[in-house]
Image (spheres, helix red, strand yellow):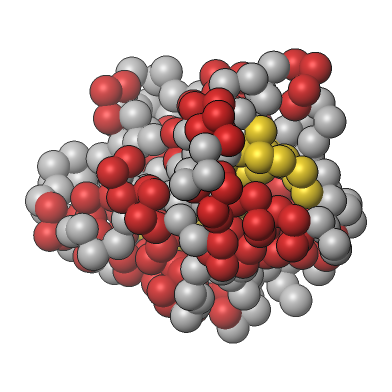
């Protein structure tokens, strides 16, 4: 399998060109040769010039014979943007999806080891998909087995439902869904990280609904934990308001929650930019930095590249 890794340029009006350039500067020179960007060469070059970030940048059209020159290589997605700093919604959507589709194709064909997509504005999906996780899951023909893993070496988290409105969470929760996702999570840790993980599962309701018989905990969550315990190191359900305390969370590799903010809010409070987002269950490795597009700080030179750097470093931990 190729060791080449792609960075998908992502949202065109964002901090992405800044964090890509800063990351490229900070990683070791011998690591740069296998990394390239999928994006529009003129767009990225123009933005770096405006931000006064001086790095060598080179357009490439074929990565099968990728050279080892010490420059940021951009596999060009050929779209003609009249103004690289003001792109309409339609063109933005076409651009981002073309970049993602190119990365997906290269990864499926094993021309690249995997890819990191820089942050993306979810509005480009026009409500058809909830986010990149769901978009790539559809392209990989997955049915509920994809897993959003927010990874840090000290602790990781997984939401069972992802970018879903709170009022929809209870309707979506099913024992079969929880079972599929925990199995995918466990398999990834064993096969790719050589770790048999200790997994904690949260309840849905405050204080696990105090054990009320008609609650989601009693009807959905507890039965699946009992079933999975036979083969997987899984415990719970734990109340969400106390498990993230220092003494309790240290016993686990991963905390699985029932919805997005139940686990992501405390996780980000603990680790800030020192985390990455990994999609499990795909036929390849897809990672993204654990932050947004930063449109409020574009051209202010304030963007922190740590999460993108950690995304690139994560490939070293993965067994082929």
Residue 37 position (above or below residue 140): above
- Residue 251 lies, in percent from the top left, at 84, 31
Q: Nearer the viewer, residue 286 or 88?
A: 286
Residue 153 position (above or below residue 73): above
Instruction: Judge whether residue 137 can be spotted in this image.
Output: yes
Could you tell me which residue is drawn at 22 percent across and 50 percent down?
123
- Residue 283 lies, in percent from the top left, at 62, 75
Apparent side of residue 123 relative to residue 145 in the rendered image (left or right): left
On the image, which quarter does residue 242 sit in? top right
Looking at the rendered structure, the number of numbered marks drawn on it comes to: 0
The C terminus lies in quadrant: bottom right
- Residue 144 lies, in percent from the top left, at 50, 68
Q: Nearer the viewer, residue 298 or 198?
A: 198
- Residue 43 lies, in percent from the top left, at 29, 49
Could you tell me which residue is drawn at 77 percent across and 30 percent down?
154
Apparent side of residue 262 relative to residue 307 in the rendered image (left or right): left
Apparent side of residue 217 relative to residue 248 in the rendered image (left or right): left
Which residue in the rendered view is the most extreme toward the front? 213
The N terminus lies in quadrant: bottom right
Residue 243 position (above or below residue 64): above
Could you tell me which residue is drawn at 73 percent across and 33 percent down?
155
Could you tell me which residue is drawn at 28 percent across and 44 percent down?
167
Q: Nearer the viewer, residue 102 or 37?
A: 102
Instruction: Judge whether residue 318 can be spotted in this image.
Output: no
């Amino acid at each position: 399998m190729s060791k080449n890794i792609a960075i998908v340029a992502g949202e065109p009006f964002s901090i992405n060109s800044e964090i890509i350039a800063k990351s490229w500067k900070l990683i070791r020179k011998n690591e740069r040769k296998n990394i390239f960007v999928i994006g529009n060469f003129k767009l990225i070059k123009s933005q770096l010039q405006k931000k006064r970030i001086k790095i060598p940048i080179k357009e490439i059209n074929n990565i099968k014979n990728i050279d080892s020159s010490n420059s940021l290589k951009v596999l060009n997605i050929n779209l003609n943007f009249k103004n690289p700093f003001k792109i309409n919604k339609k063109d933005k959507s076409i651009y981002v999806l073309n970049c993602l589709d190119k990365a997906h194709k290269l990864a499926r064909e094993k021309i690249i080891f995997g890819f990191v997509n820089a942050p993306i504005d979810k509005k480009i999906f026009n409500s058809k998909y909830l986010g990149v996780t769901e978009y790539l899951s559809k392209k990989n023909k997955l049915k509920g087995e994809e897993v959003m893993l927010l990874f840090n070496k000290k602790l990781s988290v997984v939401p069972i439902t992802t970018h879903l409105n709170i009022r929809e969470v209870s309707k979506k929760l099913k024992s079969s869904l929880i079972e599929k996702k925990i199995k995918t999570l466990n398999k990834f840790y064993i096969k790719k990280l050589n770790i048999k993980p200790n997994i904690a599962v949260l309840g849905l309701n405050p204080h696990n609904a105090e054990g009320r018989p008609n609650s989601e905990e009693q009807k959905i969550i507890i039965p699946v934990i009992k079933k999975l315990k036979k083969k997987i190191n899984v415990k719970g359900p734990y109340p969400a308001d106390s498990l993230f305390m220092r003494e309790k969370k240290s016993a686990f590799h991963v905390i699985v929650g029932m919805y997005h903010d139940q686990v992501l809010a405390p996780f980000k409070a603990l680790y800030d930019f020192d985390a990455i987002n990994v999609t499990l269950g795909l036929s390849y490795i897809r990672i993204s930095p654990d932050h947004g597009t930063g449109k409020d700080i574009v051209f202010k030179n304030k963007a922190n590249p740590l999460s993108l750097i950690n995304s690139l470093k994560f490939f070293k931990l993965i067994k082929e």
